[in-house]
Structure formats: structure tokens, C-alpha cells
Amino acid sequence: MLFAPFVAINATTILLEVPTTGRTWTGPAGGVWVELAQGKPGWLLVEGPGFNQPGPLLEEVRASDEEPIVLYALSPIDDSKFCEICLKPSQTVKHAKHWLALRMPGLKVENIIVAKEKPSEKTHGQGLRNFPANWILEDEVRLRDTPFRDGDELVFFYMGDAAQDVAAAAAEEERSRS
């Protein structure tokens, strides 16, 4: 059986278990597809080019797997909600950082810092200036060992010029298409 970490419908995240036969097929463009089970003929794309969707669309689920959590992230450019990511509690902060970079091409993983919470009155309104170092989560920390729970914001800071990095990646993508 495979698990769909996200299927965007009207900007909401839907978690859906999809019964499959386990049989896969690699298409001519390199996409990996899996066959649907239980009398529903068809194939679903697991991962591959051609649909302008970064990252895998389906992930294998085993009976022993932990229940995944969905976290949302705000854009480092304008603070609007820009994505939701689905993660297993056994995955690390670094895994979450890779998803952020994948969902906003141009962000550099090494420039993303994940924190337990946002600056607030506790930091005297001075943002990162008085931000306690123990609020920063190391890359190796498992998500189950963080304060994040299903539906929470994945609090992060981008230590660079996000708008410039994203624009440069978009320009490079455009050049590669020409």
C-alpha cells in the first residue's frame, strides 16, 4: 500500500491511503508509476517529471509506520502560507528543511534554520537579536522530539535573501527551457 503525503485540492492538504498492487512501472520520461488495486484499473504517479510537482507524490506505508503529521510553512519572502509538508515523526529537522527547499525552488537548505517557536515578547520584540540559542533545532533532531504537532506551523528563518535566491532559481529554470 502507498500513502499520498499530499494531494492539493483547493489549497488544502488531503492525506489518503491508496491501495495498490505494489507493481510499479517506469515510463519513458523516467516517472515511476504504481498500479491501483481493488478493482480500480489505473496507475498513479509516484515520482517523476512532467507534472510540475516537486518531490514524490506517494510514499510507501507499512503497518508499523507512525501516523504522519502535516505542518504548514510561511513564505520567507512575504509571510504568506506557501505550503504544507507531510512528515513522519521519525524523520529529522533536516528532512523538513529539504521539503521546504523542494517546495520553494531556490531556497538553500543550508540557509534554513528551524526553531521551536517564533520570536515574541519573550525575545523583547527584537527578532533574532535576542533569540535563545536553545530554541534552534539541530538538523539531526527527530520531529517526534520537537514541539511540532499535526497542523502546526513549521517555524523557520531563512539566513539569506530568499527573494533573490528564488528569482535566481526561476531564471535558471527559464534558461534551461530555452
Image: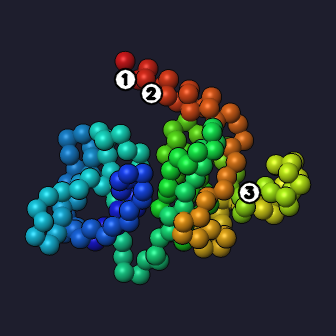
The residue tagged with tag 1: helix, strand or loop? helix
In this image, 164 relative to 176: left or right?
right
Circle 3 crowding by C-alpha within 10 Å: few under 14, some 14–19, many from 20: some
Residue drawn at x 14%, y 72% as measured from the top left: 38
Image coords of residue 22 (percent x, y): 22, 67
Q: Earlier in the sequence, mark 3 or mark 2?
A: 3
For badge 1, the amino acid type reads: Arg
Residue bearing mark 1: 177
In this image, 120 relative to 108: left or right?
right
Image coords of residue 56 (percent x, y): 38, 53
- Quadrant hosting residue 29: top left
Residue drawn at x 43%, y 23% as measured from the top left: 174
- Quadrant hosting residue 121: bottom right
Tell me, yes or no, whether the two marked residues, 3 and 1, touch with CB atoms within 8 Å: no
Tell me, yes or no, whether the two marked residues, 2 and 1, touch with CB atoms within 8 Å: yes
Residue drawn at x 67%, y 70% as measured from the top left: 147
The residue tagged with tag 2: helix, strand or loop? helix
Would residue 75 be seen by someone viewing this image from the given angle?
Answer: yes
For badge 3, the amino acid type reads: Lys
For badge 2, the amino acid type reads: Glu
- Mark drawn on residue 173: 2
Picture layout, residue 109 above or below residue 133: above
